[in-house]
Image: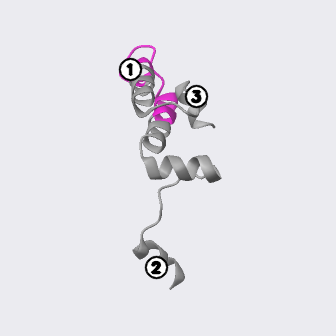
Amino acid sequence: MNHYETLDVAQDASSDEIKNAYRKKAQKHHPDRPEGDAEVFHQVQKAYDVLSDPERRERYDRTGDDDKPRSLHDIAVSRA
C-alpha cells in the first residue's frame, strides 16, 4: 500500500494538501457512515499518520518503512 495513492496526492504534496485529502477520504469512509468502510478508513488514517509527521514522511520516502521510530527503551529491551 502506497500512502500517497491511499490519499490520492502527489509525492511532493504540501502538508495542507495532505490534510485536505485526508479529511475528504476520512469523511467518505468513516465507519459510522452508511457507505463507510472500516478497513479503508484505517488505511487512510495510517497514511495520514505517516505523511503528516515530517520525520516519518522523510523516512517513508527514503526507505518505504512506515513504522514509528523505536524509542531507546524499545531498542534496549529488544537487546536484553
For the magenta stretch, what is the residue range?
Answer: 26-44
Contact check, label 2 and label 1, Cβ < 8 Å = no
Which residue is tagged 3?
10
Residue under the point 44% across and 26% down: 17
Q: Nearer the viewer, residue 35 or 67?
A: 67
Q: Is residue 28 magenta-colored?
A: yes
- Percent across and percent down for residue 31 are 40, 25
Q: Looking at the picture, which amino acid does disc 3 mark?
A: Ala
Contact check, label 1 and label 3, Cβ < 8 Å = no
Quadrant assignment, res 30: top left
Q: Looking at the picture, which amino acid does disc 2 mark?
A: Val
Which residue is tagged 2?
77
Residue under the point 45% across and 14% down: 35
- Label 2 or label 1, whichever comes before in sequence order: 1
> Is the residue 60 above or below the residue 3 in the image?
below
- Percent across and percent down for residue 71 are 42, 69
> Is the residue 24 above or below the residue 43 in the image?
above
Which residue is tagged 1?
27
Number of residues whose C-alpha sits closer than 10 Å to that of mark 3, classed few (under 14), some (14–19) or many (20 or more):
few
- Label 2 or label 3, whichever comes before in sequence order: 3
- Percent across and percent down for residue 11 are 58, 34
Q: Looking at the picture, which amino acid does disc 1 mark?
A: Gln
In the displayed image of the protein, which residue is found farthest to the bottom? 80
